[in-house]
Amino acid sequence: MTGFGNRAITINPAALGAEGSPVESSWDSTDCLLYALSVGAGMEEPAGSELEFTTENSHGIGQKALPTMCVVTGDGLAARDGPLQALGRFKLTLLIHGGQSIRLHKPLPVAATIRTVARITELWDKGEHAVVEITSTATDAVDGTPVYTSASTLVFRGHGGWGGERGPPERASDRPDRSPDEVLSYTTRADQALLYRLNGDRNPLHSDPVFAARAGFDRPVLHGLCTYGFTGRALLHAVCDGDPARFGGMDGRFSTPILPGDPIDVHIWVDGSRVWFRTLSGDRVIIDNGTMTLT
């Protein structure tokens, strides 16, 4: 395993298919408000167009949850017998979030209790690295109806090399070969990562300068799922007229991390019922191969 100190660390290939026990989690109005603020809602116009996501008591406006909030409401990984335990030993500093997809089976409620089961659905040996897909299925704890399905692609640097299948080649984007139909631009806050981590992701890569340096960064980087949330907001407003009921899901691959305070530009293409997106910061691609599903 060149480039990583020749450590004899590999992911357990028998972990494919491992499934954890159901994990119950809940959220409420305050959690929705916190998430919305943590992905920039209301930043440009605090008393303006996003009050349904940033307030719970504005006159004539009912509170709603941002669709991408499902990435923080429960992924089933907290189970003691969960998929991460089945993978064996790995170093957190060598873990990269490679991609994320979500599918909403109904608009995300402002308050709910769900049960989530996580399962390893893909496990590939890329030589020096291992790529693992973990799919989480959330159902309503009261009536058992599906709420959302999410899939996270994780890259374990330096943890491959067991001789397993490499998996299919990365798909090329089929987005239209033209300029984007719309570009929405945002600026992240200098303390964006400190705010976003309050949703539950306390990975010190996003807050601790010493830990970030060990992972090869000059300073803490912004959560990939925070840029994912900014991107989801752009899609919601540009394609769905701000209506979460029209937002079916989104899928994208993380390309490059950004720092808190960096700008975000979401490029959007629409062709009938098909939607593509690409998120950039300056000339750097942050999220690539993005697609959106409409209900």
Image (cartoon, rainbow, N blue to C red):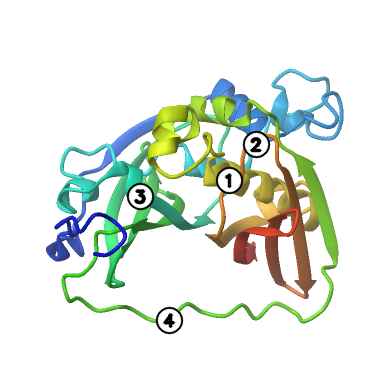
Q: Marks 1 and 2, how far apart in space? A: 10 Å
Give the amino acid at mark 3: Leu
Residue in the picture at 43% in, 81% down: 169
Q: Earlier in the sequence, mark 1 or mark 4?
A: 1
The answer to whether mark 3 and mark 1 are in CB contact below 8 A is no
Quickly name the residue at label 1.
68
Identify the secondary structure beneath mark 2.
loop
Quickly name the residue at label 3.
95
Q: Earlier in the sequence, mark 3 or mark 1?
A: 1
Residue in the picture at 29% in, 67% down: 128
In this view, 14 is above or below 58: below
Residue 34 quadrant: top right
Q: Marks 1 and 4, how far apart in space? A: 27 Å
Give the amino acid at mark 2: Val
Give the amino acid at mark 1: Thr
Residue in the picture at 40% in, 43% down: 215
x then y, percent, for residue 166: 30, 78
Q: Earlier in the sequence, mark 2 or mark 3?
A: 2
Q: Marks 4 and 2, how far apart in space? A: 32 Å
Front position among marks 4 and 2:
4
Quickly name the residue at label 4.
169
The answer to whether mark 1 and mark 2 are in CB contact below 8 A is yes
The answer to whether mark 1 and mark 4 are in CB contact below 8 A is no
